[in-house]
């Protein structure tokens, strides 16, 4: 039950951070979501039996399942690499990326053809 509550709190924090506009908060939300997935994967292996995956006694009722542990290790590596890519995108992104707030007068379709200068503008 503790793992389920911890995973729920982490997912709630991730959803809250995803709703913000700053890229750094989105990256932090992704990190929280990755931790929540790791907790869910570990809970899938059974929390009541936590012995070594391969020990001296190979009784299946005592030994922990090694597959969720392998999944968590893989998920950690994937989440780390995606976090690095997202941080690089946050740093190298343009400062004027503003897709959420569009003024009403800019919603009209832009002219596809640029305006040609007239004779008075050219000076001839």
Image (cartoon, grey):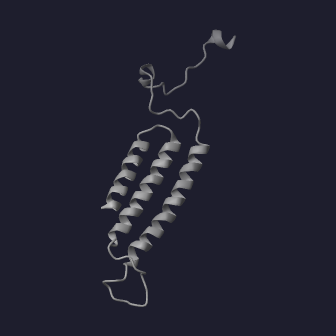
Outermost residue toward the right? 123
Residue 94 in the figure: left or right of residue 8: right
Q: Residue at x 36, y 48 (%)?
A: 12
49 up-or-down from 40: above or below: below
Q: Nearer the viewer, residue 83 or 13?
A: 13
Location of residue 91 in the rendering, given as x and y in whole percent from the top left corner: 60, 44
x and y percentages locating residue 86 in the rendered image: 53, 50
Residue 31: x and y, percent?
Answer: 48, 53
Q: How many marks?
A: 0
For the N terminus, the quadrant is bottom left
**Residue 116, quarter of picture:** top right
Q: Quadrant of the C terminus?
A: top right
Q: Is residue 72 above or below residue 17?
A: below
Query: As drawn, is 96 to the left or to the right of 57?
Result: right
* Residue 71 place in picture, x, y as percent: 42, 70
Q: Going 42% across and 81% down the picture, which residue do you hit?
A: 53
> Residue shown at 60%/13% (left/top)?
118
In this view of the protein, which residue sits in the foreground, 115 or 95?
95
From this view, report whether residue 29 is shown above or below residue 114.
below
**Which sits in the foreground, 43 or 108?**
43
Q: Between residue 64 and residue 119, name the one nearer to us.
A: 64
Corner quadrant of residue 114? top right
Q: Which residue shows up at 50% across the image and 32% down it?
A: 98
Looking at this view, name the residue that lies furthest to the top: 120
């Amino acid at each position: 039950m503790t793992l389920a509550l911890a995973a729920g709190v982490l997912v709630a924090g991730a959803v809250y951070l995803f709703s913000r506009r700053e890229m750094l908060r989105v990256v932090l939300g992704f990190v929280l979501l990755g931790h929540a997935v790791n907790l869910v994967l570990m809970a899938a292996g059974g929390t009541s039996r936590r012995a070594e995956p391969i020990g001296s006694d190979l009784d299946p009722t005592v030994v922990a399942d090694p597959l969720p542990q392998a999944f968590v290790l893989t998920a950690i590596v994937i989440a780390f690499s995606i976090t690095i890519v997202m941080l690089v995108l946050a740093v190298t992104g343009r400062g004027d990326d503003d897709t959420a707030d569009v003024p009403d007068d800019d919603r009209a379709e832009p002219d596809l053809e640029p305006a040609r200068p007239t004779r008075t503008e050219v000076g001839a």
